[in-house]
Amino acid sequence: MVSSSVVENYVSCCSLASRVFAVVVMVVLLLSSASQAQLSSDTFYAKTCPKALSTIRTTIRTAIARERRMAASLIRLHFHDCFVQGCDASVLLDNSTTVASEKFVLQNNNSVRGFEVIEQAKSAVEKLCPGVVSCADILAVAARDASEYVGGPSWTVKLGRRDSTNGSPSLANRDLPRFTDSLDSLISLFKTKDLSARDMVALSGSHTIGQARCVTFRDRIYNGSNIDAGFASTRRRNCPATDGDSNLAPLDLVTPNSFDNNYFKNLLQKKGLLESDQVLFSGDSTDNIVLEYSRNPSTFSSDFASAMVKMGDIEPLTGSAGIIRTVCNRVN
Ligand code: HEM
Ligand SMILES: *[C@@H]1O[C@H](CO)[C@@H](O)[C@H](O)[C@H]1NC(C)=O
Ligand SMILES: *[C@@H]1O[C@H](CO)[C@@H](O)[C@H](O)[C@H]1NC(C)=O
Ligand SMILES: *[C@@H]1O[C@H](CO)[C@@H](O)[C@H](O)[C@H]1NC(C)=O
């Protein structure tokens, strides 16, 4: 109503050219507000829960101070949330009579972690302002706080996501990347989430921290090509050919607890741990991006931050869609 009367006012006053212009502008504005369920700025909880962000931050920092790897686990949790039916905290849901959990698909089973830290942040925030702050927003804020705490970039987190009432094991299985994926598959998978090849390479740079299980890199260290021989032999020591599936190794052998660009430098030396890491530098189309990030940490930092914002924008539930869960692992 308001919009159309504004258009009429314009139309009654001006030349044909400016009338047409005004109508075009209004149509573009209306379409852009209708077609994307848009997140709000970082002030979304300023009135309803002013201490939300500082409370989440305190919980996250305490958890990472206790266990440094938690920074990696929390960043990954946000990623595994956003890639499956959007950033809606579906990854956090347990099996129930109405919910099929995503936690048991191959890419998540015995692998994603950090749930208890998100629950701690949620319960702290729930005490201050019950029913206000979504689990999906907590995941997004936690990922940012985690990056910042271990020396990575920071960024402004858009807010206003709401939580799903279901999970989708089949979408999780379809949309979460696998360490066996080819470069072309990785590029096209990220493209389905509106993330470019450059975004994909930047986001993979979060493998500058955290750990992977033997089962995810065994084939590469025993049978891989395009791998440094000394590196492969070192990794075989704690990853037997037929045993020790869950033995861990750092994704970045140089500085596994700091967010820096060593991950990309390792790829230049064929010391990527996962096959899906090394394919980013394997004589193909993303080589130049890896080279650039290996030489220029500040470009990596700023690209990583913008890619995380883009990732946090994937198909959010906003407005009256979805719910605000009371606890993150089940629906109210
Ligand atoms: C490009 C496709 C990707 C593949 C194939 C992939 C695969 C993997 C695998 C197999 C692991 C080890 C899991 C385990 O041992 O159980 C891992 C760990 C990790 N991934 Fe990725 N990943 C990808 C992209 C990403 C992205 C986009 C992010 C974040 C933005 C990310 C963040 C992490 C982190 C931080 C860890 C370490 C987690 C921890 O120590 O708890 N990964 N990834
Ligand atoms: C949860 O449900 C899925 C099927 O939806 C099943 O594969 C899985 O084993 C269940 N996990 C547990 C712990 O009950
Ligand atoms: C998940 O891992 C457990 C072992 O912890 C295993 O028993 C179960 O079969 C796995 N689930 C799936 C769906 O692979
Ligand atoms: C390496 O490849 C050979 C031949 O395909 C296979 O028999 C063997 O199981 C592989 N070893 C590992 C540890 O993946």
Image: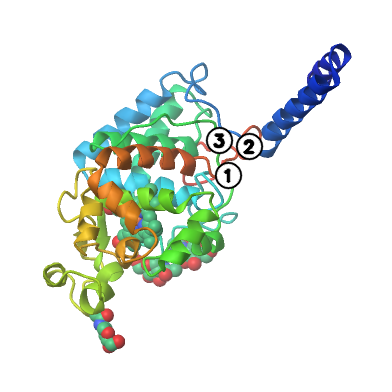
Marked residue nearer the N-terminal end (3 or 1): 1
- At x 54%, y 44%, the residue is 314
Marked residue nearer the N-terminal end (1 or 2): 2
How is the model colour-coded? rainbow
Mark 3 sits on what residue? 324
Mark 2 sits on what residue? 37
User: Judging from the image, what secondary structure is the residue with disc 1 in?
Assistant: loop
Q: CA distance from mark 1 to mark 2?
A: 7 Å
Q: CA distance from mark 3 to mark 1?
A: 16 Å
- Residue 228 image-quadrant placement: bottom left
User: Label 2 amino acid?
Assistant: Ala
User: Judging from the image, what secondary structure is the residue with disc 2 in?
Assistant: loop
x and y percentages locating residue 64 in the rendered image? 24, 39
Q: Nearer the viewer, residue 265 or 318?
A: 265
Mark 1 sits on what residue? 315
For the C terminus, give its image quadrant. Answer: top right
Verify CB contact (< 8 Å) between mark 1 and mark 2.
yes
Which label lies toward us, 2 or 3?
Answer: 2
User: Label 3 amino acid?
Assistant: Ile
x and y percentages locating residue 177 in the rendered image? 43, 61
User: Judging from the image, what secondary structure is the residue with disc 3 in?
Assistant: loop
x and y percentages locating residue 20 in the rendered image? 81, 26
User: Label 1 amino acid?
Assistant: Glu
Q: List the single residue furthest toward the top.
A: 13
In what quadrant does ligand 1 lie?
A: bottom left
Position of residue 19 relative to residue 116, above or below, is above
